[in-house]
Image (cartoon, helix red, strand yellow):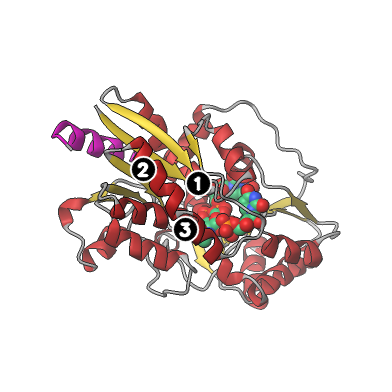
Amino acid sequence: MIKVLSIVGTRPEVIKMAPVIHQLHKEKQIKSFVASTAQHREILDQMLAFFEIKPDFDLNIMEKNQSLPELTAKLPIPLDNLLREVKPDIVLAQGDTTTAFLVSLACFYRKIPFGHVEAGLRTRDRFDPFPEEMNRTLISQLASFHFAPTQGAVDHLLSEGIKKDLIYLTGNTCIDALGYVFANEKGVKVDEGIDRSKKLILVTTHRRENWGDKLEQICEAIKQLADRNEGVQIVLPIHPNPNVRGTILSKLGGHPRILLVEPLSYEKFVILMKRAYLILSDSGGVQEEAPSLGTPVLILRETTERPEACEVGAAHLVGTKAGEIVAAAQELLDDPRKRQAMVVKESPFGDGRAASRIVEVIRLWGARGG
Ligand code: UD1
Ligand code: UDP
């Protein structure tokens, strides 16, 4: 019997770890624990509830509008106490958040093997996305197991000197999470005041490197698209980060064709992604999910660590200048054939079986004595 501790902190970590946690709970030779740092609070709890995951431990560290150093400083001691209490054989965390980075560091200090879910994503620009590119680069140096979602991610890890036999090509667990949504459909209706006779444009934005001028430009583009296109309904679930929320409310509040809503449950958000004519987003997870749902995405960023969606034609990297965003979106609104050309048949991010591959690696490692 081996003890596996999975640690999550933010909304996307819950979504992408949920399939792994569900699979770990099923394994007879594994005792599975879950801890939350609660780097996020409301939107973390919303996702935990949806996936029916009840953490065994909650470090409860979120404070409103805390800075990166404040967040970073809060985690090491509670994480170390957690590791001392649980004494896991292996710890898992996902992605490139501050939670994921500090979990990998805490494991290193205690010499506990750390398994990195979604390893190897890179833009090679240390400030974009910020601080995620540096977080994930450092995590790769600290991890013992690297679960890479794509061949491109494997290649990045190899190029940084990570040993081949520690890298596992698994696919991205977000495709498994989408499978969970469809397997557990509860007939949820998305109303939220959306005018269904219009073309839906779904928007999300939260990236730290976009705060300020770039976010203002993104909002300007959204406003221009709404002004110009009477037949369009824009829906934007606002991320709770106050640096994002304030700008969005002041720039876009009150427009008749822009619906600003609170963060949506995963099920509702997936329904809207599927229904949308077009998605505009700077989110990592959304770039990966949209191709599976047959919806084109315009990526509101200067770089992406997920080039696979662009390579298969399902996404375009449009940057953060208002004029360029509007031009790219307008082209797809005006020409449904151009939009249709972005609808792909297969996801470049996996086949929905990533979690079982990850857990099998851990199970076999445990069976060999850890
Ligand atoms: C974090 C991650 C980012 C990830 C994103 C997913 C870091 C540094 N950033 O960014 O990589 O893409 O989550 O959404 O790890 N807040 C609430 N309620 C919540 C969540 C957040 O009020 O449920 C507010 C709080 O004021 C909090 C602030 O948002 O202090 C910032 O949260 P934080 O986790 O530091 O950064 P995000 O921008 O959410
Ligand atoms: N998401 C959601 N409800 C929302 C907005 C996003 O369920 O209102 C989901 C989305 O499908 C994706 C994830 O949250 O899986 C993305 O989270 P976020 O954009 O916060 O983080 P990132 O992926 O950029 O790290």
**Would you name the residue on which mark 3 appears?**
98
The disc placed on residue 83 is 2
Q: With 216 as the anchor, is 230 left or right in this view?
A: right
The disc placed on residue 37 is 1
Place of residue 131 in the rendered image (x, y in percent of width and height, measured from the top left): 48, 67
Residue shown at 48% from the left, 47% from the top: 13
Tell me where the magenta segment starts and ends, as one range: 352-369
Query: On screen, 262 above or below 138?
Result: above
Residue 307 at least partly seen: yes
Q: In the depicted view, which residue is nearer to us: 143 or 206?
A: 143
Q: Check disc 2 and report its element: helix, strand or loop.
A: helix
Estimate the spatial distance between the alpha carbons at disc 1 and disc 3, rounded to whole Å: 10 Å
**10 Å crowding of disc 2: few (<14), some (14-19), many (20+):** some
> Is 289 covered by the magenta stretch?
no
Q: In the depicted view, which residue is nearer to us: 231 or 289?
A: 289
Place of residue 2 in the rendered image (x, y in percent of width and height, measured from the top left): 25, 31
Q: Earlier in the sequence, mark 3 or mark 2?
A: 2
The three-letter code of the residue at mark 2 reads Leu
Query: On screen, 158 above or below 264?
Result: below
Residue shown at 39% from the left, 60% from the top: 308
- Disc 3 residue lies near ligand 1 with CB under 8 A: yes
Query: On screen, 207 above or below 294?
Result: below
Query: On screen, 192 above or below 146?
Result: above
Estimate the spatial distance between the alpha carbons at disc 1 and disc 2, rounded to whole Å: 13 Å
Residue shown at 42% from the left, 61% from the top: 306
Estimate the spatial distance between the alpha carbons at disc 3 and disc 2, rounded to whole Å: 17 Å
